[in-house]
Amino acid sequence: MGAHNNISDYFDFSKLNNLTPAKGRVLISEPFVNDDYFTKSVILLCDYKEEGAFGFVLNNYIDQPINEIIDDFSDFDTKISIGGPVETNLLFFIHTRPDVIDDSIEILPGLFMGGQFSQIKELVESDELKNNEIKFFLGYSGWDKGQLDDEVANNSWFVANVSTETLMNYHGDDIWQKLLESMGAKHKVIATFPNNPHLN
């Protein structure tokens, strides 16, 4: 076979994006993004408005327990992800327990963001909060007005719907691949692409 210089020789990514960004949907990076935060990343969009958008990278995990990051926090079996390049010195969280965490903001039915952190510490200490009921992030990903739409139009992201159950129960490093594989045959092929196709 002859050499191909562009991935568009194989796929027109624009034909694979059937959804537009929206609050509660996820962004799945195209396979050749080379970035400390976004390489093979999956981002939950927590808000999407005309003036901008923000969300958390779900699968950029750090190898450090939460009780080493937050003072007086109990040992808790959870992974922390770098949510994005903005305010990486702050801890953010999503959860499914608005019944016991006040001031929570709904993202999707059954999925919430933020709330009283003191209550979370107490719930963890008393073993009343499970690791599939909350996820923690250092920093977040943000887009100015029109920026995310331009990136999607330029095929930097695939957009997908994912259930709250999947978001909260899956903690594997391979969620990027698994989600693409679940989106159909062409996406499944994309999930197997090497980071640099010219090396093959």
Image (cartoon, grey):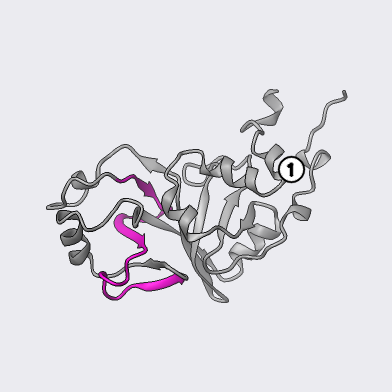
Residue at the image point whose x is 66% and y is 58% from the top: 152
State the extent of the magenta-drawn residues as a range: 78-107
Extreme-left residue of the structure: 72
- Number of marks in picture: 1
Q: Residue at x 45, y 47 (%)?
A: 170
Instruction: Determine if the magenta segment contains residue 56.
Output: no
Question: In the figure, is residue 147 to the left or right of 64?
Answer: right
Residue 17 in percent (x, y) is at: 71, 57
Q: Quadrant location of the N terminus?
A: top right
Q: Confirm whether residue 30 shows in the render.
A: no
Q: Position of residue 116 (x, y in %)?
A: 24, 69
Considering the numbered disc 1 on the image, is that residue within a helix, a strand or a loop? Answer: helix
For badge 1, the amino acid type reads Ala
- Is 80 part of what is drawn in magenta? yes
Q: Is residue 195 above or below residue 180?
A: above
In the displayed structure, 80 sits above or below 99; it is above
Depth check: give the residue in front, 136 or 9: 136
Who's the residue at 37% across and 55% down the image? 139
- Residue found farthest to the right: 2
x and y percent of residue 192 in the render? 65, 33
Quick one: 118 or 2, which is closer to the camera? 118
Q: Quadrant of the C terminus?
A: top right
Residue closer to the observer: 199 or 114: 114
**Residue 75 quadrant:** top left
Residue at 60% from the left image edge and 43% from the top image edge:
33
- Residue 189 percent coordinates (x, y): 71, 37
Q: Which residue is mark 1?
A: 185
Q: Crowding at label 1, few (<14), some or many (≥20) Cα neighbours within 10 Å?
A: few
Residue 23 seen by the camera: yes
Classify 175 as above or below 85: above
As rendered, which of 35 and 172 lies closer to the eye? 172
